[in-house]
Amino acid sequence: MNFREALSLLQTEAVAAGGHYQRRLSSTSPLALFAGLLQPGLVPALFAEISQDSLAKIERFPTCRGLGFEVKSLGSGQSQVLWYPRSKGDHEVFLSLADDLHLATYDSSTEKLGLLGLVDRLSAWQVFLGREGRLLSRPEQEGLAGELTVIHRLLDLHFPASFVLQHWVGPEAGDHDFRFAKISLEVKAASARPNMAIQISNLRQLDELLVEELFIALILFEEAIEGLPLPQLVQSLRGRLDGADLKTFENRLLKTGYRDEDARHYAQPYLVRSFAWLKVQDDFPRLRRTDIDSNVLDAVYQIRVDALTPFQAEEATVTSKLRSELA
C-alpha cells in the first residue's frame, strides 16, 4: 500500500468517526512508516517510529521548504519522527515526497539502513525543493542528457555501476561532473550547429591545477526525431540498474531537478552525433584564477568547439586511468 492509498482510507475513516488516525504502510519493512492525519484539520502526515538507538546515528534530518518536521519520545526506547505540509499549497508536493520516501525505504533489510536511506532521499528532496518547483531549463536538460550519456558510456565499458554513480557529483553542484581520486571528468554537451560553443560556468571548472588530471567529455547532439527525449534516457538507464545502485541514481537524479511528473515538458529528442574526450593541459583555451586580475571575482565564458580538436584524447587513455582506481 502506498502513502496516497493509505491516506485515502484514513480520510474515509476520519470523516466517519472523527479523531486522529494513522496506518502503517508496510507490515514487513523494518522501518515503521505510517500515513497519518493530524488534528485540527486532518492534515496529512508521514510518521516514522524509530528506536532511539537508530535515531542516535543520525546527526541531523534535512529540512525541506514547505515541510514541517518534529521529533518526540514515545517511551520504551522509541521515538516518533513526523513530517507534514506547512500549508495547503504544499499538500501535493508533500504527497509525492511521502510516497517517494516509502518507496525508497520499504525493502531495506534493517531499521538502521532504512533510516539512512530515508535521510539520503530527504537530502535529495531538500535540493530539489530548493529550486522552488522550477522545471529544468533547456541548457539544464541538455547538460543532464550529456551526463546520462557518459554514465551509459562508462557502463558500456564495463565499469561497475556503483563505481560510476558514487563518483557522479554533478548533481551536488561541484566544479566537475565526475570526481575520482586522481582524475576529474567534466561533461560538456551542445547541440550541433554552426559556430558551436561550450559554456564554462566558473574559473575553477577548467583549472587543471586544482586536480591531478582533468578531462572533458564533449558530446554533440543532433535534434533528430530518431533521438531519445530526456525521460527515455532516464528510463533506459534505470533499466540497467538495480538495488543500491538504482537508489543512488534516483537520489542524484532528483538533485538535478528532474522528476517523472514533469516528463511531458521534456520532449526534445537527443541523438549523439559525436562523443570525444579532451584533456585540459598546456595551451587549452580556458581561464583560470591565476590567469586574470585578482579583482575579477569569477567569470562565465564560452569556448568555440572547433578550437578544441587538438586536445582530443584517446578513450583508452581515460579508461586506463579510471581502471587504475578500481585496483
Image: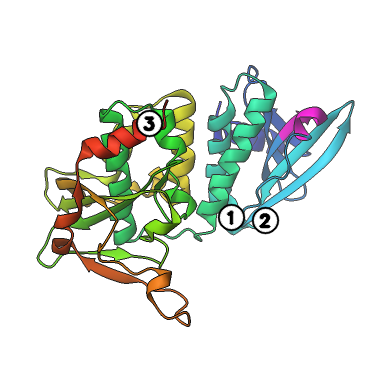
Label 3 and label 1: CA atoms lie apart by 48 Å
Q: Which quadrant of the structure image shows residue 80?
A: top right
Q: Quadrant of the N terminus?
A: top right
Residue tagged by mark 3?
324
**Sooner in the amino-acid sequence: mark 2 or mark 3:** 2
Q: Of helix, strand and loop, which one carries label 1?
A: helix
| Contact between labelled residues 3 and 2, with CB atoms less than 8 Å apart | no
| Residue under the point 58% across and 46% down | 123
Q: Nearer the viewer, residue 170 or 62?
A: 170
Highlighted magenta segment, given as a residue range: 48-55
Residue named by callout 2: 86
Q: Nearer the viewer, residue 300 or 65?
A: 300
Does the segment drawn in magenta span residue 54?
yes
Residue 90 marker: 1
What amino acid does circle 2 point to?
A: Arg
Mark 3 Cα-neighbour bin, 10 Å: few <14, some 14–19, many ≥20: few
